[in-house]
Each structure stands twice: as structure tokens, then as C-alpha cells.
Amino acid sequence: MNLDLHTTAVVITDPQVDVLSPDGALADLLHAQVAKRRVVDNLRALRDHAERAGVPVLYSTLERRAKHTRAPATNAPIYQLIHERGAMLEGAGAAIVPELAPTERTTLASPRGGMMAFGTTDLDALLRARGARTLIMGGMVLNLCLEANLRAAVDLGYEIILVSDATATISDAAHEAALASLALIAAKIVTTAELLPALTRAAAA
């Protein structure tokens, strides 16, 4: 795999406590798969290799504001679940996990209130300002927010490299089904072990 570091960026969706931590609000649904796939370690390796190679790394986060916690359950089961559990609240479960705390080179897009960042936050503008045309994508949850961002990015003209073990969902079956669907959309689906040497080679070229 060849990468043009001048036109590549990494986008990590929701590197946050409630979806990645063993004591997060959604841990009973997600953490077994997060641990099995070593998602936090793989995201950390991806972030660190990219930043050393000079590739922009951007985080897109979901955040519920405390003043909205009394709002009625919304229009999708996942939003209802988040509401019922008090998940993804600013200053609490929406915090970024310590292992992925932003470095001075990590860029945080403006938080979003729903699944998709493109068209609702400044993520697209930040990427275009950096000349990005290829996005390396990972994060949470594979068949929810990450998939929403991936599909939107493709429609906006970006080429996508999806890192299959830098993301997770609720089960092996759901994970494989999502990857099978996204194989028709992402330009490449690779593992962390496959991607990191490509970043290293490109940086050394």
C-alpha cells in the first residue's frame, strides 16, 4: 500500500470514555469487543505513527450538553439508549480516554450531537484546509457513528482507508457484517499491522 502523506489525514471517531472504557456507560454492549480487538492500543498506535509521519490527525466526538439532559428520548433506539443511560455527557462520559488524550498535534473538530460530523461540524473544512483527499478512519462505533462518517466522506469525494481492528461494535457477527457492507464503499479495509508499515515507509521516502 502506498500513501501520499501530503494528501492523507487520519480521522478518529469518538475516542471517548462511554464507548471505549471498561466502565463507560455502554461498556456492557461494547467493551468485550473493544478489548478483543485491542481498539484503544490500535488507535493509539495509529495516532502516534501518523503524527510522527506528519499526517494530520483529527478527532470527531459526540457530546451531549448537560442542559439538554431533560429532553425526551429521540427518534432512534441508539439515541434513546444514550439518553436513558446519561451517556456521552460533556465533562463525563464524553471525555476522551486518557490513552488517546490529544497531543499538541491532534486537532479536535467541533463536537456533534448526532452520528454524522460532515455537514454538522467543522470537520470537512478542517480536512480541506489540510489538503486531505484520503482519510484513514477508525474509532467507534463501527456500524453507527464511524459508518455514518465514512459514508458521508465518500459522498464528499474522499477516498477512505478503514482500519478494521481500530474499531468495534457489539459482536463478531455485527463487526463482520459491517465490514462486508463497507467493502463496497471504502477504497481499502486494512488492519493496523498492515497500515503502520505503510505510514513508516511513506515518512522515510
Image (cartoon, grey):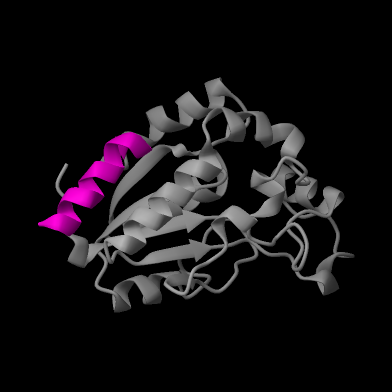
Q: At x 78% / y 43%, what residue is drawn?
A: 23
| Among the 4 quarters of the image, the one containing residue 8 | bottom left
Query: Which is nearer the eye, 42 or 61?
Result: 42
Q: Quadrant of the N terminus?
A: top left
Is 121 magenta? The answer is no
Whether residue 123 is situated above or below residue 32 in the rendered picture: below
Q: Nearer the viewer, residue 130 or 180?
A: 130
Residue sitting at 67 percent across and 35 percent down? 31
Q: Nearer the viewer, residue 45 or 123?
A: 45
Classify 179 as above or below 128.
above
Q: Residue furthest left?
A: 205
Please tell me in which quadrant of the rendered image residue 5 appears: bottom left
Please provide the residue range marked out in magenta.
189-205
Q: Between residue 3 and residue 132, name the one nearer to us.
A: 3
Could you tell me which quadrant the C terminus lies in? bottom left
Q: Is residue 156 visible?
A: no
Residue 200 part of the magenta-drawn span: yes
Where residue 86 appears, as percent x and y from the top left, is: 83, 55
